[in-house]
């Protein structure tokens, strides 16, 4: 085993663990009636820096830290171009949901995205559809990240997959269960900072090892000139396809529940303003660095055939072992911060949206507390058991998690906020059409190549928009009065 | 979108800022797309290199990122308004 790499990783885990304990102490000070708001939303008191970092960290998952750079390694600058479409998330989500979402969430007293939809549309099918979609898709997404985390620990430390999974699971479970959303957000901030510093150090190391940027680019051009074009190593990365990622990983992110819930967690508009700027800078720096590392690694370490291994291998190659250990805490941090956010979100959906809505609306504070801790822990344990030997269904569902949720939620959220004629019929139609067409087009694209040359997510987002408008207008044309609803007056 | 007098003034602020967000995203996309495919479609032999990077990439992604960050900072400082989120009658 490689102790020089393991020790910095262990130190990182210990720090994260203590943040969890600290957050739970802070949570213990809040009064009983505010327990849910504190546990699932951090008491709506996130400041600008923590808000920006938790958004970025939640969003930057295993795919941007291992898969993305790995693909850049194979495809060249075209993939870095594609990855840079994510900078828009840094400001777009907070600007678009923005103050209206913050105000309405408080007015409705909403703690979860489902709470918001429930209050806005006042419809049981909307609640059931949205809670179902969140539980099924995000549960699978979480399990997939969990597997990625364990594989990373495995490849870094030489431990077996099962031991690695256990270490990973225990560390995440402890701080999420005891610390709730605040622990998740604060650890996300630390993890985000680790990602920024880690990618800067590694990029510098890679450029030095490659003999400067000019040298690296010359090597790339002499190997295959296509690597420095926007069209990919084989020249088949089309304009339309790359541009459609502006929907999948750019503006469509507005529809992701784990991101949307953060947009109701901040303290005041000053926090939001600060988060807009910090979030844009941090997203851009991380994405640019990470993917440049991927492509610059190619001349230094040619012939890596598994994309996910590019970052671990290049770190160990160009940095001293102890520094590689610190840098490799970055992808670890990315995975942990995504998993923890999904875990708390799925748990809040089960406790708040299903249990309190339909099973036991009059549960006592004590029962709610026990249920919140219990459900979080139990969900974590189920994911752990599934990840030991992942069933095919899980892998399959994960394919839809990102784009499917975007297609389902983007319009019920955005139009619900800004369009007064939006109603439950539109929302239900939009969710069904979004998920349904996503699955159908996924299969079509697998069999026949991408329809219209764009990513699967594009058409379902358009179709769910059309469905929303048509069904809202046909079924019932009645303007919604955003003013009528005052706090505590929700049907 | 709603001009009745009783419309919460904060919603007007919110609507305007959401539209600014959409505008910035469109501008961001146009810049990114224009330089990437405008300059990047030339044959590789004609590329020039800035700080070692291909020119289309430098303008599209590096300058584009710096520019949009500056714009976001500018817009937030100049056009974004501070509003209270709690209802006025029940300020704590």
Image (cartoon, coloured by chain):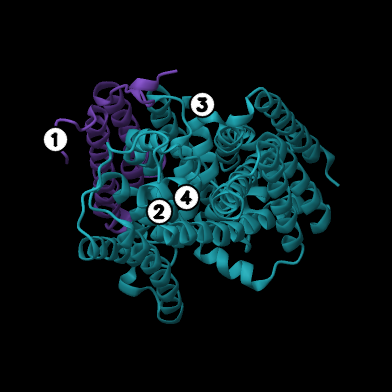
Say yes or no: labels 1 and 3 on the same chain. no
Q: CA distance from mark 4 to mark 3?
A: 20 Å
In this view of the protein, which residue sits in the foreground, A171 or A1?
A171
Q: Chain of mark 4?
A: A
A29 horizontally vs A272: left or right: right
Residue at 58%, 70% (x, y): give it: A396
**Res A58 quadrant in image:** top right
Q: Secondary structure at mark 3?
A: loop
Q: Which residue is mark 4?
A: A114
Q: CA distance from mark 1 to mark 4?
A: 29 Å
Residues at marks 1 and 3 touching, judged by CB atoms closer than 8 Å:
no
The Cα atoms of the two marked residues, 3 and 2, are separated by 34 Å
Which numbered circle lies on residue A82?
Answer: 2
Quadrant hosting residue A405: bottom left
Query: Which chain does the numbered disc 2 sit on?
Result: A
Residue visible at 25% across and 47% down in the picture: A480
Q: Which mark is residue A45?
A: 3
**Residue A489 position in % (x across, y down):** 39, 38
Secondary structure type for disc 4 = helix
> Measuring 44% from the left and 34% from the top, which residue is drawn there?
A279
Please give the letter of the chain rendered in purple. Answer: B
Colour in which the image shows chain A: cyan
SS label for mark 1 = loop
Give the Cα separation between the discs numbered 1 and 2: 44 Å
Mark 4–mark 2 distance (CA, rounded to whole Å) = 32 Å
Q: Are marks 4 and 2 in contact (CB under 8 Å)?
A: no
| Labels 1 and 4 within one chain | no
Mark 1, Cα crowd under 10 Å, few <14 / some 14-19 / many 20+, is few
Which mark identifies residue B4?
1
Between A208 and A270, the one lying in front of the other is A270
Name the chain under label 1.
Answer: B
Q: Is residue A253 visible?
A: no
């Amino acid at each position: 085993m490689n102790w020089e790499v393991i020790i910095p990783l262990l130190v990182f885990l210990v720090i994260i663990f203590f943040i969890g304990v600290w957050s739970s102490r802070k949570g213990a000070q809040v009064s009983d009636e505010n327990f849910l708001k504190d546990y699932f939303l951090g008491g709506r008191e996130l400041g600008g820096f923590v808000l920006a970092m938790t958004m970025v960290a939640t969003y930057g998952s295993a795919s941007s830290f291992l898969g993305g750079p790995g693909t850049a390694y194979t495809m060249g600058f075209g993939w870095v171009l594609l990855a840079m479409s994510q900078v828009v998330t840094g400001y777009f989500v907070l600007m678009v949901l923005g103050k209206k979402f913050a105000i309405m969430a408080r007015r409705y007293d909403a703690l979860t995205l489902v709470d918001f939809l429930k209050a806005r549309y006042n419809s049981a099918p909307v609640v059931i559809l949205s809670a179902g979609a969140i539980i099924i898709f995000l549960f699978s997404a979480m399990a997939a990240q969990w597997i990625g985390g364990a594989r990373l620990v495995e490849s870094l430390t030489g431990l077996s997959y099962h031991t690695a999974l256990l270490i990973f699971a225990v560390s995440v479970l402890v701080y999420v269960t005891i610390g709730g959303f605040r622990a998740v957000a604060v650890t996300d901030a630390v993890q985000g900072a680790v990602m920024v510093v880690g990618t800067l150090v590694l990029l510098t190391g890679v450029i030095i090892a490659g003999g400067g940027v000019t040298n690296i680019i010359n090597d790339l051009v002499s190997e295959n000139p296509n690597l420095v074009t926007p069209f990919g190593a084989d020249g088949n990365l089309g304009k339309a396809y790359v541009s459609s990622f502006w929907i999948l990983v750019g503006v469509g992110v507005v529809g992701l529940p784990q991101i949307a819930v953060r947009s109701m967690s901040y303290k005041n508009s000053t926090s939001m303003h600060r988060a807009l700027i910090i979030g844009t800078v941090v997203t851009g720096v991380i994405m640019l660095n990470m993917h440049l590392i991927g492509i610059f690694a190619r001349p230094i370490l040619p012939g890596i055939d598994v994309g996910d291994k590019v970052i671990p291998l290049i770190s160990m190659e160009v940095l001293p072992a102890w520094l590689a250990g610190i840098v490799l805490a970055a992808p670890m941090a990315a995975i942990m911060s995504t998993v923890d956010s999904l875990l708390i979100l799925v748990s809040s959906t089960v406790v708040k949206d299903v249990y309190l809505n339909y099973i036991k609306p009059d549960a006592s504070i004590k029962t709610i507390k026990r249920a919140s801790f219990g459900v979080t822990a139990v969900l974590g344990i189920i994911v752990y058991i599934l990840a030991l030997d992942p069933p095919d269904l899980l892998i399959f569902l994960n394919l839809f998690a990102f784009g499917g949720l975007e297609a389902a939620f983007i319009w019920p959220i955005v139009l619900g906020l800004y369009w007064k004629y939006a109603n439950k019929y539109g929302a239900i139609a939009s969710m069904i059409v979004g998920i349904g067409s996503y699955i159908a087009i996924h299969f079509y694209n697998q069999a026949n190549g991408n329809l219209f040359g764009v990513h699967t997510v594009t058409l379902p987002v358009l179709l769910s928009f059309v469905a929303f408008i048509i069904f809202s207008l046909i079924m019932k044309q009645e303007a919604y009065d955003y003013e009528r609803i005052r706090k505590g007056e929700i049907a | 979108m709603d001009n009745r007098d009783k419309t919460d003034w904060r919603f007007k602020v919110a609507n305007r800022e959401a539209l600014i967000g959409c505008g910035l995203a469109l501008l961001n996309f146009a810049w990114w797309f224009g330089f990437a495919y405008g300059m990047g479609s030339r044959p590789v032999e004609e590329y020039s290199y800035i700080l070692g990077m291909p020119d289309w990439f430098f303008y599209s992604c590096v300058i584009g990122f710096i520019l949009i960050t500056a714009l976001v900072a500018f817009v937030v400082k100049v056009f974004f308004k501070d509003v209270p989120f709690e209802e006025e009658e029940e300020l704590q």
